Image (cartoon, grey):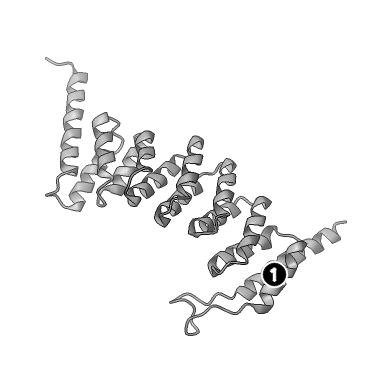
């Protein structure tokens, strides 16, 4: 008669094998395959980890498989996903690596944020954005300086740390054509800029016109009044200057 631990061990292996088979069965529908994938969450066996890495190639299983790898601590498999030829796989790998908040992964995610594929780059920034450690700030600032979609996302997250080091980067966005990026930059400058920003802010406030489509903004969104945002930023700086004078 087998010891209880051996029976349990064998049963676990058999259950794992059954779930893997059902997850990879192309005859099953997406719900059934994802249910099988979920059953394997927390399973750290080499067979299951390998199956999850392979399942990342399937768009129907990718999200579940990538999360399972993270929860199994399969960092090497997720790092390998960043080198995959499929940008969707790279994006999923970046997102899950960021969720680990492991400091040694910051440089890898910062490199992924430079990916030529916008989806991968954005997901890499999303990964970095999950870090609460201020050590991530230099990476976010570096990405923000690139000025693309990932850069705007990095600027937004970096600003949340309230560090003045982001202000010079925000100033560079004021000369671009991306209205959304300019709004974020103006908000950053309003919170942390200084008197040297007032000339540019007043210039924008005087020249900018509301961005609208048929008078209703973009779709169901209200129009963006860049002049007002710039004016508000200037007022914030002026208020800080006045406060300093009054406290002397």
Residue 178 is situated, as x and y percent measured from the top left of the image, at 54, 68
- Considering only vertical position in the picture, is 158 above or below 12? below
Please give the residue where the numbered disc 1 appears in the rendered image. 201
**Closer to the camera, 97 or 235?**
97
Which residue does the image show at 62% across and 77% down from the upper left? Answer: 208
Position of 48 with respect to 169 (left or right) is left
Furthest-right residue in this view: 248
Label count reads: 1
Residue 234 is situated, as x and y percent measured from the top left of the image, at 71, 68
Residue 148 is situated, as x and y percent measured from the top left of the image, at 51, 59
Residue 205 is situated, as x and y percent measured from the top left of the image, at 67, 75
Which residue does the image show at 22% across and 46% down from the upper left? Answer: 35
Q: Identify the secondary structure beneath mark 1.
A: helix
Which residue does the image show at 56% across and 43% down from the upper left? Answer: 136
**Closer to the camera, 39 or 92?**
92
- Considering only vertical position in the picture, is 120 above or below 102? below
Which residue does the image show at 54% across and 67% down from the upper left? Answer: 180
Which image quarter holds the N terminus?
top left
Place residue 72 in its image quadrant. top left
- Considering only vertical position in the picture, is 108 above or below 5? below
């Amino acid at each position: 008669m087998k010891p209880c631990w051996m029976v349990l061990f064998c049963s676990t292996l058999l259950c794992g094998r059954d779930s893997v088979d059902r997850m990879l069965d192309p005859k099953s529908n997406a719900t059934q395959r994802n249910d099988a994938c979920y059953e394997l969450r927390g399973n750290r066996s080499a067979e299951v980890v390998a199956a999850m890495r392979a399942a990342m190639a399937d768009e129907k299983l990718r999200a579940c498989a990538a999360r399972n790898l993270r929860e199994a601590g399969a960092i090497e498999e997720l790092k390998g996903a960043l080198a995959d030829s499929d940008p969707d796989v790279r994006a999923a790998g970046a997102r899950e690596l960021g969720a680990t908040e492991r400091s040694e992964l910051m440089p890898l995610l910062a490199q992924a944020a430079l990916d030529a594929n916008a989806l991968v780059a954005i997901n890499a920034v999303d990964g970095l954005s999950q870090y609460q450690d201020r050590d991530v700030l230099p990476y976010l600032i570096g990405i923000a300086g690139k000025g693309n979609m990932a850069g705007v996302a990095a600027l937004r997250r970096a600003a949340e740390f309230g560090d003045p080091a982001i202000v010079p980067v925000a100033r560079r966005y004021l000369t671009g054509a991306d209205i959304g990026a300019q709004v974020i930059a103006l908000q950053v400058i309003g919170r942390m800029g200084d008197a040297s920003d007032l000339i540019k802010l007043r210039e924008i406030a005087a020249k900018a016109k509301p961005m609208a489509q048929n008078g209703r903004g973009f779709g169901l969104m209200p129009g963006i009044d860049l002049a007002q945002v710039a004016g508000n930023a200037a007022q914030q700086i002026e208020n800080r200057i006045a406060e300093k004078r009054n406290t002397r």
